[in-house]
Image (spheres, grey):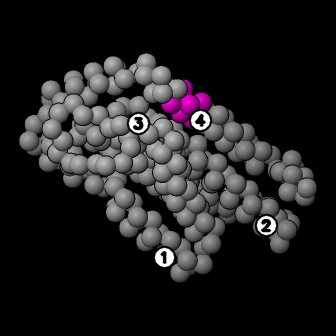
């Protein structure tokens, strides 16, 4: 195939593909390791001990704070930001960026639904909950959705001056949403970790596929410009 020949002759692209393969292998390996421990129950005691230790430090102030924080990674917040990005990129006719946002965030949401139904893990019930959740627990939808959004934005900004800022803000956002789910007692630590790893594997793969396609199309229209200003 022509695209394979193009990839073989493009050293920067080969390095990116190699890095993506490594990230995918590590992230999916971690996810399935976590999933196995969840299925056989070997990690449940540690999950519960962590949550109970965390709950000992609870206070009304922290309750209010983390209830607010967790909403920033919920379906409504992530959907609003995602739709806003899609509308902006479509208006600017930035179709590759539109595709990345749609598949990165939307695909992660679909994966989460499938994973929750497949593992059907019940949520923790260790103390009176401040918020109510009805879906299954593994992997965490908040952790997966918020991290998919953050990873997608990092990919979009990777070739800009905002790369470091995106990494820092994204990391803080991902951690705070995940931690809020633990503090509120609606997820086990393994739920959150699984959401992060599955999201990372998905977005890294999608971003690289779209980037490769964009580079290939650009090389056909401007052969001397193969790495031209790809921003994802």
Label 3 and label 2: CA atoms lie apart by 44 Å
In which quadrant of the rendered view does residue 38 lie? top left
Whether label 2 touches label 4, CB < 8 Å: no
First in sequence, mark 4 or 3: give its number: 4
Residue 25, position as x, y percentages in the image: 65, 34
Residue 164, position as x, y percentages in the image: 47, 48
Residue 185 as seen in the image, left or right of residue 158:
left
Q: Which residues are magenta?
A: 27-35
Residue 173 as seen in the image, left or right of residue 1:
left
Residue 82, position as x, y percentages in the image: 45, 65
Residue for badge 3: 121
Residue for badge 1: 87
Tell me the quadrant of the picture where the N terminus can be found.
bottom right
Residue 144, position as x, y percentages in the image: 45, 47
Which class describes the residues within 10 Å of circle 3: few (<14), some (14-19), or many (20+)?
some
In which quadrant of the rendered view does residue 6 lie? bottom right
First in sequence, mark 3 or 1: give its number: 1
| Nearest-to-viewer mark from 3 and 1 | 3
Label 1 and label 4: CA atoms lie apart by 31 Å
Disc on res. 162: none
First in sequence, mark 3 or 2: give its number: 3
Which class describes the residues within 10 Å of circle 1: few (<14), some (14-19), or many (20+)?
few
Looking at the picture, tell me which residue is in the foreground, 229 or 174: 174
Disc on res. 28: 4
């Amino acid at each position: 195939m022509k695209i394979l020949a193009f990839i073989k002759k493009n050293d920067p692209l080969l390095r990116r593909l190699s890095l993506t393969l490594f990230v995918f292998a590590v992230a999916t390996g971690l996810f399935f390791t976590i999933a196995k421990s969840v299925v056989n129950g070997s990690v449940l005691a540690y999950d519960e001990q962590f949550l109970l230790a965390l709950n000992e430090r609870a206070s009304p102030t922290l309750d209010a704070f983390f209830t607010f924080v967790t909403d920033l990674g919920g379906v409504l917040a992530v959907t609003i930001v995602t739709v806003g990005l899609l509308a902006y990129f479509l208006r600017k006719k930035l179709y590759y960026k539109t595709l990345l946002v749609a598949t990165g965030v939307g695909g992660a949401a679909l994966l989460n639904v499938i994973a929750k139904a497949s593992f059907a893990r019940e949520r923790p019930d260790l103390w009176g909950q401040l918020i109510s959740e009805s879906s299954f627990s593994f992997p965490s939808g908040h952790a997966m959705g918020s991290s998919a959004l953050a990873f997608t934005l990092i990919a979009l900004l990777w070739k800009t001056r905002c790369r470091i800022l995106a990494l820092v803000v994204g990391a803080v956002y991902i951690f705070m949403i995940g931690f809020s789910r633990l503090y509120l007692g609606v997820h086990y630590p393994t739920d959150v970790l699984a959401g992060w790893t599955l999201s990372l594997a998905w977005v890294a793969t999608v971003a690289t596929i779209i980037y490769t396609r964009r580079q290939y199309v650009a090389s056909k229209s401007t052969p001397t410009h193969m790495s031209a200003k790809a921003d994802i």
